[in-house]
Amino acid sequence: MNFSKKHLAYLIIFFILIIDQALKIWVKTNFAIGDEVKVIGNWFILHFTENPGMAFGLKFWGIWGKIGLSIFRIAAIVAIAWYLNHLIKQQVKTGIVVGLSLILAGAIGNIVDSAFYGYLFDSGTTYSSEFNQWISYYGISKLNFGGYAGFLQGCVVDMFYFPIIDSILPSWIPFIGGKHFVFFRPVFNVADSSITIGVMYLLLFHRNTLFGHQHNQKS
């Protein structure tokens, strides 16, 4: 039983990583920043952007904030991997293994970008200490190991954009009436989706089992 659950975890992580990295590399080597392709109408778009910060484009504290965030992500990956292995040994439900594996795969997928993309590609979004901001680049990147940034300084590649609602708000709405409104605005990737799905799945279907297991362990 333990053996099969471990293999299930490995399979999920491997599958997510392959899809995540293959799509990111394809987008980065075929799109310039801001390029987009409509997949389904105007509400499912592949829109290439690079994210130097947290999920959904949140940024803070320049290059040192990015390095600190990357170190935190690595620590989180180690902790999740240890916890997943611990739960498998404790004969936890298969669904919990699936959920945690999705979260772990997504976390690994994004740290790969941060750790290695600065070495693998010849161009990418970089931080300018002179202007105290992140600077984009022109053209299409090449996967030629030319390098554009150091370790943990690469940017995460995002591409999924779902502007399901894209309109001008009615003028009668207080404060925001007449303004352009887009939902869902953030651009994300397969790794982000894997984390979100894993978290939501655990909260919806295994919350009591997961937190009950933690409580019993403490007792």
Image (cartoon, helix red, strand yellow):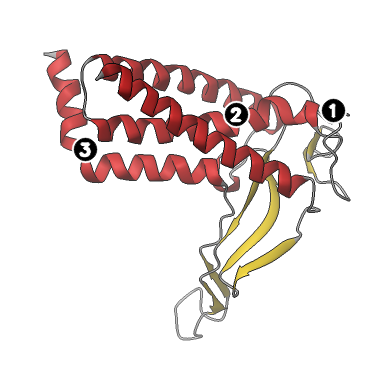
How far separated are the C-alphas under marks 2 and 1?
18 Å
Helix, strand or loop at mark 2: helix
Q: Nearer the viewer, residue 68 or 4?
A: 4
Element marked by disc 3: loop
The residue mark sitting in front, 2 or 1, is 1
Q: Which of 215 and 191 is in front in this view?
A: 191
Q: Which amino acid does label 2 sit on?
A: Ile
Q: Name the residue under label 1.
A: 145
Q: Residue at x 37, y 40 (%)?
A: 198
- Spatial CA distance of label 3 from label 2 is 27 Å
The image shows residue 174 at horizontal and vertical percentages of: 45, 77
Looking at the rendered structure, the kind of residue marked 3 is: His
Q: For the residue carrying disc 1, how many other residues have a C-alpha within 10 Å: few (<14), some (14-19), or many (20+)?
A: some
Q: Mark 3 points at which residue?
A: 206
The image quarter in which residue 157 lies? top right
Q: Are marks 3 and 1 in contact (CB under 8 Å)?
A: no
Q: Which quadrant of the rendered structure holds the C terminus?
A: top left
Residue placed under numbered mark 2 in the picture: 111
Q: Residue at x 88, y 51 (%)?
A: 139
Q: Where is residue 33 in the image (x, y as percent from the top left)?
A: 78, 53
Q: What residue type is labelled 1?
A: Phe
Element class at badge 1: loop
Q: Is residue 117 visible?
A: yes
Mark sitting earlier along the chain (3/1): 1
Relative vertical location of residue 66 with respect to residue 87 in this rendering, above or below? below
Give the residue drawn at x 56%, y 70%: 43
Q: Do the residues labelled 3 and 2 touch (CB within 8 Å)?
A: no
Front-lying residue, 215 or 179:
215
Image: 92 above or below 58: above
- Quadrant (top left/top right/bottom left/bottom right) for the N terminus: top left
